Amino acid sequence: MAALARPRTQTHIPADAALSGILALLVDEREERVKEDKAAAKTEVLLGKAGVPVENIQALTGKKADAIRKAIQRAK
């Protein structure tokens, strides 16, 4: 006789926390790929164009705010 599966307990994750986590994973993956493709736009530039505030880009990338602002300005 097969063992009965235990019911899973549902854990609620706030949407903003879940989206922040997903975005952080995507940024990390993209940063690794950009190292190999020098012609690709910088991640901070793409996030800036999407309207993400510099402070959030800084938290996601670990880069200094001044460096982020300069990269965005140079890309314009």
Image (cartoon, rainbow, N blue to C red):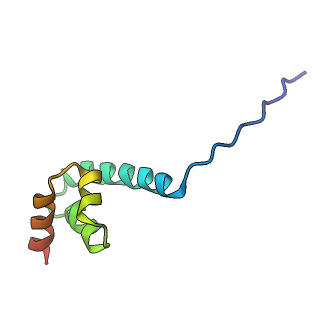
Snapshot quadrant of residue 72: bottom left
| Position in image of residue 11 (x %, y %) | 64, 43
In this picture, residue 2 sits left or right of residue 73:
right
Which residue is found at the position 32% from the left and 72% from the top? Answer: 50
Task: Note whether 25 is above or below 68 in the view shown.
Answer: above
| Position in image of residue 28 (x %, y %) | 31, 48
Which residue is found at the position 84% from the left and 28% from the top? Answer: 4
Which residue is found at the position 13% from the left and 78% from the top? Answer: 76
Between 50 and 14, the one lying in front of the other is: 14
In this picture, residue 29 sits left or right of residue 9:
left
Snapshot quadrant of residue 9: top right
Between 66 and 48, the one lying in front of the other is: 66
- Count of labels in the image: 0
| Position in image of residue 13 (x %, y %) | 57, 49
In this picture, residue 7 sits left or right of residue 65:
right
Task: Note whether 13 is above or below 66 in the view shown.
Answer: above
Between 75 and 34, the one lying in front of the other is: 75
